[in-house]
Image (spheres, grey):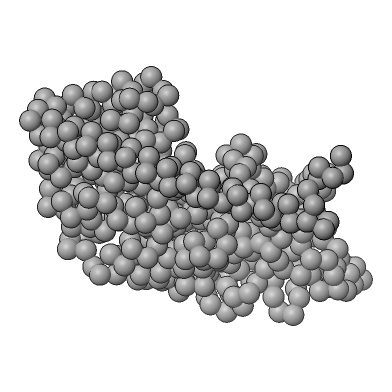
Amino acid sequence: MIKQILGRLPRKPGKTGDSRDAAGLNGNEPSNSYSVAKSMEPGNKRSGNGDYVVPAGSSPNPMTNGTVVYHSNEPLPAFKEVSASEKQNLFVRKVNLCCAVYDFADPTKNLKEKETKRQTLMELVDYVTSANGKFSEAVMSEVTKMVSINLFRSSSPTPRENKAIEGVDLEEEEPLMDPAWSHLQIVYEVFLRFVASQDTDAKLAKRYIDHSFILRLLDLFDSEDPRERDYLKTILHRIYGKFMVHRPFIRKAINNIFYRFIFETEKHNGIAELLEILGSIINGFALPLKEEHKLFLVRALIPLHKPKCVSMYHQQLSYCITQFVEKDCKLADTVIRGLLKYWPVTNSSKEVMFLGELEEVLEATQPAEFQRCMVPLFRQIGRSMNSSHFQVAERALFLWNNDQIENLIRQNYKVILPIIFPALERNARGHWNQAVRSLTLNVRKIFSDHDSAFFGECTQKFNDDELKREEFNSKQEALWKRLEEAAAPRSDNNSSLGTPNGKCSQAAG
């Protein structure tokens, strides 16, 4: 009788879970095991940060088709309550528990389960940080699975249109924050510490952090949430450093993102973060630079100056460009000619940024490379000096405040001065901004003090050219005046022919 009564009592799901977890560590548990929130309704797709679909009509039983399904409210012991040999088993169970994903669009829903998951994630962070001993392959499999379920979500916020094209400053807009960030942040922290941990063997982990995983991780860089992009930046950099086998693939995948951004969409939220990672990668390139790296500079980095929203990532782009020139001074000519190719015509703020980047590149430029590009370069600098936008003109004249650039100019002043002298004279005689006129006079004085005789020759040539131009303009005006006078009688005849019977309008009077 007592046995019959006891047989009717439900068994604790924890024991079943324990036996299954032990089987999982021995490699017998299916790799696609998952956890499902007990409160989720069957047949509904996750509307939070995951894409697992609960089949309609399924029941929240601890055993489903031979796969363990851990409930979010299943009590699990703390790590300090189990022996050292059982900690990795418990870690796997807690990781599976965190595969449950909830709808954060409704802040009043599943409050208890959400808090349980958050506390469990915090425990995982502490364990990964202080773990002793290498992580097993089963642990690596479960961690990457949990990360995939939580991070690679299908229902991400709709990306904004690229307002930079419409003349709206994106920096003034508030970024869209993910409502699930209270959980996502800790998932990112778990994964970051897992990748950075010395107990994670790269040779084993590369089976799970593979090309497909990296591509999906890179897709997340288009997130609207800057907090998420910051975590992604750190994690991808750690992956690049730890998994040497993945390095060429990561560089190629980032290249493809840039190509699509430059030549197709001009819409992406994570260009600045990707460039920041690349700045560190470029800094570590061995010398001499490989042809692959030079092609990356020419085909991806330099064309990144083209999009109208370049201001969103220009600081990081300028750093990458300068790193290349510092690594190989022979690339200075290529970089400067590339800047001139994409030089803005009507966008004054963009031109100021280009002038600032140009100064950084010229600081790392050697005299031989400078001489190759100085003629087209100073033609453009002369146009910028004559700009009616005072900030553009000022920024161009500020180049003479840089000792390295001034030395390069002094060494080649006989080529450079005739090119920019007209711009200097026109600024000194008639620029509307007083600060620009003062800076122009300072630059004129530098050239005059260096070689007064040659400066006088340039002055004389400029005056002669101005006289010739005035004579040419006078002849053109006289020619146009004669043409107008010759055309006047003919137009009078045509007007008289336009009245009925060829009679003038006087008849009407």
81 relative to 467, above or below: below
- For this view, does 21 lie left or right of residue 132? right
Residue 24 lies, in percent from the top left, at 57, 73
Asked if residue 224 is positioned above or below residue 41 in the image, the reply reads: above
Could you say where residue 119 lies in the image, as x and y percent from the top left?
64, 45
- Residue 338 lies in what quarter of the image? bottom left
Please name the residue shown 33% across and 63% down the image. 298
The one nearer the camera, 214 or 40, is 214
Decide which of 54, 47 is in the foreground and name it. 47
Give the quarter of the image for residue 222: bottom right
Q: In this view, does 353 lie above or below 251?
A: above
Q: Where is residue 154 in the image (x, y as percent from the top left)?
A: 69, 64
Q: Nearer the viewer, residue 356 or 133?
A: 356
Q: Which residue is drawn at 53% across and 77% down?
A: 27
Residue in the picture at 43% in, 42% down: 477
In the displayed structure, would residue 409 be above or below residue 70?
above
